[in-house]
Amino acid sequence: MSADSSIAIVGAGMTRFGYTPNRDLRSLAHEAVTESLLDAGLGPRDVERVYLGYCLDLNGQRCIPGQIVLRDLGIDRVPITRIESACSSGSLAIHEAFRAVADGRAEVALAVGLEKMSGASADATRESMSGGADAELEAALGITFPGVFGMAARRHMHRYGTTLDQITAVSVKARRLAAMNQRAHFDTAVGADEVMASRMVADPLRLLHCCPLSDGCAAVVISRASRARRARGRPVMIRGVAQLSGDFHIPGDLTSFPETTRAAGLACEAAGFGIADVDLFEVHDCFAIAEIMHCEDLGLCEPGGGGRLLEEGATLPGGRCPVNPSGGMIGKGHPLGASGVAQLVELTEQLRQRSGSRQVPGARTGLAHCIGGFTLGRPASVAVTVVAI
């Protein structure tokens, strides 16, 4: 969808991601939403619509989560809509908030991503997570997310010669950058030996090739840039958005997700510039092989060349195509409903030049990419958002 050039993220806020059984949904949401409104220079009564990305229902609040967590902040008497699309729930909350402002349904819209994954039993977590695929077919046969990406890794290694060392380099990079991010789940770097010493999850992927179970909340305030007179930072313009589901009639081969290529092309076309003009990327690295695949699908290298990008240092903040300077989902954490919004918080801070030691020099454009769910080897939802200053 083409973006009105005046519509922007004018405020951003986010909790630290982590495994925090002592925190509830309210405390997570209050922290991130309050920070986003303060950053925007606006108050709760300025918010005219809310879209909440919330996915797993692991902590009892199965219905009306947005109304419950926001009421004590004074955000009420306005439409509050929950959006669920697995890991892309938060991304689509941003898209809907953008559309509400673009369509004139609101002057100020709030997009929130929220998830609490701690505190639930292992059985409840497994049952809920299995719903990210066809519960009667794939999940019943054990084809859950680790299995899908374990198969993808093996297939990619077979077809392109990608090495386990290259896959492991994704995790090492992620944890190194996460250690520089005060909001990340992990605050320590790891080496390749430590990654390879962690327990096997889905061959060839070990525990440290995988994202953690995390709690957290992220929020962005979206309005026309003219409303940002009191904002703490420069408005970050939303230049293009796109979302696609997979082609479920043609089973995927697990070495590429063409939906990523198509969605990124549509979002960049709306933005008026190409992938080569994007300064940094936040992509859905739920497992280490995923970052390699997404780099290829986005056109940052040729098919099969994603591993070499890591070896060359091209995806570091000072490289030619920085990817996941936040630490990504492997390092920053992955509270499912919150991750898509957190990607835009990272891009906003990067484009405002306030990311400290993780800063991408001179960043003026960014792309966020998030996948939600799988079936028949295809992503159920691919969401892409392109921003610029």
Image: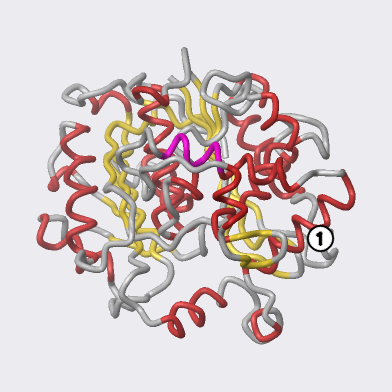
Dot 1 falls on a residue whose secondary structure is loop
Q: Residue at x 36, y 76 (%)?
A: 58
Does 116 appear in magenta? no
Residue 68: x and y in percent read: 20, 69
Determine the image quadrant of residue 115.
Answer: bottom left
- Relative to 94, 141 lies left or right: right
In the rendered image, the quadrant that contains the N terminus is top right
> Residue furthest toward the top?
362
Q: Is residue 179 shown above or below 30? A: above
Q: Nearer the viewer, residue 46 or 147?
A: 147
Residue 311: x and y in percent read: 69, 29
Residue 116 visible: yes
In the rendered image, the quadrant that contains the C terminus is top left
Q: Is residue 340 shown above or below 12? A: below
Say what amino acid the circle numbered 1 marks: Gly
- Relative to 204, 371 lies left or right: left
Residue marked by disc 1? 252
Q: Residues within 10 Å of mark 1 (few under 14, many from 20)?
A: some
Residue 71: x and y in percent read: 14, 63
Q: Residue at x 31, y 42 (%)?
A: 183
Q: Residue at x 38, y 82 (%)?
A: 121
Does 176 appear in magenta? yes
Q: Residue at x 35, y 78 (%)?
A: 120
Residue 77 visible: no
Residue 129: x and y in percent read: 52, 74
Determine the image quadrant of residue 372.
Answer: bottom right
Give the residues in magenta: 172-178
